[in-house]
Amino acid sequence: MGPPAERQLVRRLTIVLLALFAGVAAYSRLDLLYSHKFFDITGRAEWIWAQHQLSRETPVAFFATRNFDLPPNRQFTRIKIFGDPEYTLYFNGREIGGRRVGEESALDVYDVSKLARDRGNRIVVAARSPNGVGGVIASVDVSDEYQNVVPTGSGWAIVRRWRDDLIVRDPPYSWMSSPMRIGRPPIGRWNFLSRRPAVFTPPAQRIVQPRSAFRFKTAVPAIEDRSGVVVVVARAISATAYDFGPISGRARANAPSELRSVEGPVEPFVFAAGERTVTDPQERQFRYVMVYGSQASVSVVQ
């Protein structure tokens, strides 16, 4: 190979290297842009969950809590939150909102400016999962420049048992534990999150009782540990179906139960220790609420 051929080969290699460098630089720039955009949304907030063996696939319900102060010169107070698969948000003693999450990955933004105060604010997030798997992420914005105050992470506490004053004060210290920190976004199936205005839970106007009820026999899946191997078995059980319908509203039950929609999947109710009543966090159209084991008080909040 003579000098002209060598120079041509060097020129081609140089072009390839320059193109490769430009591609890497463009990718890095794009990744930095999206990462910075997401950091502006969630900052130092981490996905958290209760300390729990996820592989067991057992139902879990708990409460993530945080007490905090706010700067007096804030422009607004907005809570950004996402709880997968289900959450209910309480702020300063009031139920704010919640939902059962589908495929959409979006932070719900609640403007709680009228309820916020300079000192002694309290957030409580009730999280529920029928298979024990999920994540909660939240933070607070107080101005366009001062965002992501009190992000979820080590400063939050996990409470596994309900008590009637939990939404206004901490329970005994022995009831509280540190959260399992899953990591900062983007991570897992949640990846990058967007923002959307959230719908506040309206005050109850009336409570509707079921029209009728009937008993039947069925089977529910149960987790058993057989010589160190976790298996799912079918357990025979009696049940009661409460007929509302059809109706629109938020179902409320005080025993392990399921909500059967007019259209769509069956939604389970997951109870934490000490809870006597659980209300569906979002309004939906359905007909039956099925309670397993024994009869219970079931109603619909409208």
Image: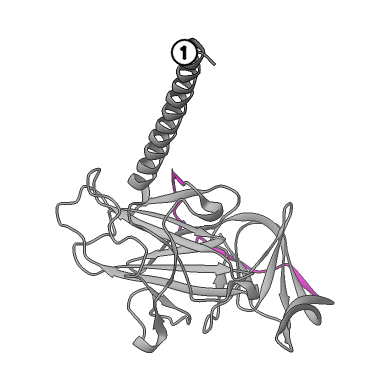
Task: Please give left or right for residue 2 compared with residue 102 in the image.
Answer: left
Task: Please give left or right for residue 44 compared with residue 218 in the image.
Answer: left
**Which quadrant of the view contains residue 208?**
bottom right
Badge 1 element: helix
Q: Residue at x 64, y 77 (%)?
A: 297
Q: In this view, does 121 lie above or below 163?
A: above
Q: Residue furthest front?
A: 2
Q: Can residue 58 be seen in this view?
A: no
Q: Which residue is drawn at 48% across and 80% down?
A: 160
Q: Residue at x 14, y 52 (%)?
A: 73
Position of the N terminus, as image quadrant, is top right
Q: Residue at x 52, y 48 (%)?
A: 105
Q: Which residue lies furthest to the right in this view?
A: 217
Task: Please give left or right for residue 72 compared with residue 102 in the image.
Answer: left
**Which quadrant of the view contains residue 233?**
bottom right
Give percent across and percent down for residue 195: 43, 44
Q: Is residue 281 visible?
A: yes
Q: Which residue lies furthest to the top in this view?
A: 4
Q: Name the residue under label 1.
A: 3
- In this rendering, the count of numbered labels is 1
199 falls in the magenta region: yes
**Which quadrant of the view contains residue 44?**
bottom left
Give percent across and percent down for residue 189: 56, 53
Task: Please give left or right for residue 193 compared with residue 60 in the image.
Answer: left
112 falls in the magenta region: no
Looking at the image, which is closer to me, 252 or 170? 170
Residue range highlighted in magenta: 193-216
The three-letter amino acid code for the residue at tag 1 is Pro
Position of the C terminus, as image quadrant, is bottom right
Give percent across and percent down for residue 71: 17, 57
Q: Circle 1: is it few (<14), some (14-19), or many (20+) Cα within 10 Å?
A: few
